[in-house]
Amino acid sequence: GGRSNPGGFLIQARSLPKQAAADRVRDFNEITLKPNAETGQKQASRCTDCGVPFCQNACPLQNNIPDWLALSADGDLREAWKTASLTSTMPEICGRICPQDRLCEGACTLQQSGWDGVTIGSVEAWIADKAFENGWVEPIRPLAERGQSVAIVGAGPAGLAAADRLRSAGYQVTVYDRHDRAGGLLMYGIPGFKLEKHVVQRRIDRLVEGGVRFVLNTSVGSDISMDQLRQQHDAVLLAMGVYQARHLSIPGCGPNDALPALDFLIAQNRRDLGDSVEATTASGKNVVVVGGGDTAMDCVRTAIRQGATKVTCLYRRDRANMPGSAREVQNAEEEGVIFEWLAAPRALISRGETVNAVRAQRMALTEAGASGRRDIAPVADSDFDTPADLVIEALGFEPENFAEQLDPSLDISRWNTVQVARGGFATSLPGVFAAGDAVRGASLVVWAVRDGQDAAAEIDRYLRARTEEAAA
Ligand code: FAD
Ligand code: SF4
């Protein structure tokens, strides 16, 4: 496509409108306002086609961003969609929830030169949404059936991306998941205000229509064994994610005194999906969330929407050193969340049987040591109490014991993730591959998608080689 508007960034400022905080906290819908034909084209036209695609290099999928921005700027959304869908099996999902400030948009030449980066994620989601609305999303129709079958353990983004590519290549694909719905953290972890559930469901529907089989409510390792899977399928992909939550271990915190973040988030996602759920809500409560990652940000914002009286986030380090996305902290602040930076929980305080406050100690940044990195140290006599009727722990996730769960001869890394061969996806078990968070540890959706797609390509090579061996 031609570049219809060279220097568009001089005429057009970056604009990424979202609903006003006072309105958006009343429901669980996405907060970003979708571009229309005019605003979408204008934002896409800000790309200067700088010639060095830093954005593409910073995208884990190496998306061909300059090309689909130029096509979108010209109004050729169908071609833009075709280009975007070559490298990504879920552009409308990554466009919504990638931390773009740390990936494509952070690397954009305009951003780097003080002009504010192109709204790459928003344009990506826009063209993919248009493709679904206009029926441009092709159904999966393999050119030829290949006969061999692949089992995928886990229906999160890694498993779904692999299922898409493997089924398109003609394999019989069965995805097993212990949940009652597919989608993994896309469905049950990430809240609707970042990613509405129908967006995830239509991807799953497309896979089902294309012939992918989903076996839900089935835990591999207990409901069905790895041996059974390996007998019934020609290859297996492990994409289980990481789910063992770290817990608060401080005086006064009994086993039921702090609510695990994922229990809280899953309950709300189920309500959004229309299930009747009786779990604890934040309504009318003083809520304290402990942690500083994506999960903590999702919890504080969910608590606000459930009608909490006051929501406080306690984090040991300062704002600059938190692992969560800066964009999400800003959203949370706009919605009324109070951040206590440099505050380390020391104890839960109870009145009678119930917790009613979190005691925390102030931390301070230390002088830079030999490593050049500033650490934190407690400040003497600095304890303070924050009233709390509900304490939510969002301290991160570790892998489960995969060897014990699945097969004792599955090699595990020293981080307890599944060990894979260098530069690939093969595990220590022949014909068994692994991808996503189960290999990387807690990471990002876009990396899970990348892994799923690449693992599918490796499984395809493996199965083709097996077919040739058998024929020889
Ligand atoms: P998962 O999505 O975890 O899927 C694994 C699936 O395997 C699950 O459905 C699980 O039920 C199933 N499973 C596990 N064990 C078994 C078994 N034995 N048998 C059968 N099924 C099994 N990333 C972003 O990029 N942007 C965000 O905004 C973002 N927000 C997040 C918010 C929260 C609350 C959390 C927890 C994570 C967030 N992440 C975000 C990270 C992202 O969700 C993960 O990196 C990504 O989902 C990993 O994909 P996966 O396919 O490897 O695993
Ligand atoms: Fe940016 Fe993520 Fe889309 Fe890549 S997948 S272009 S990093 S939003």
Image (cartoon, rainbow, N blue to C red):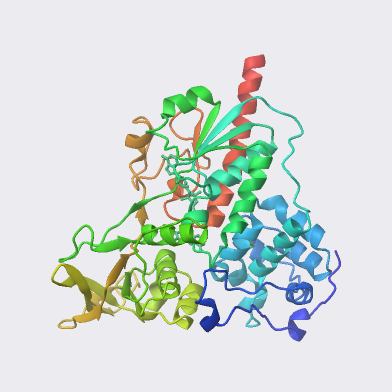
Front-most of residues 396 and 256: 256
Locate ligand 2 by image quadrant.
Answer: bottom right
Q: Quadrant of the C terminus?
A: top right
Residue at (19%, 64%) from the top-left corner?
A: 253
Residue that extends furthest to the top in the rendered view of this protein: 472
Query: Eyeballing the image, is 220 above or below 247?
Result: above
The answer to whether residue 59 is visible is no
The answer to whether 465 appears left or right of 71 in the picture is: left
Q: Quadrant of the N terminus?
A: bottom right
Q: Quadrant of residue 284?
A: bottom left
Residue at (21%, 57%) from the top-left corner?
A: 255
Front-most of residues 316 and 139: 139
User: Could you say where residue 23 lies in the image, as x and y percent from the top left?
Assistant: 55, 80
Residue at (64%, 52%) from the top-left corner?
A: 202
Query: Eyeballing the image, is 199 above or below 210?
Result: below
Front-most of residues 46 and 335: 335
The answer to whether 131 appears left or right of 431 in the picture is: right
Q: Quadrant of residue 149?
A: top right
Query: Eyeballing the image, is 285 above or below 436?
Result: below
User: Could you say where residue 426 lies in the image, as x and y percent from the top left?
Assistant: 50, 35
User: Could you say where residue 429 lies in the image, as x and y percent from the top left?
Assistant: 44, 29
User: Could you say where residue 235 lies in the image, as x and y percent from the top left?
Assistant: 54, 29
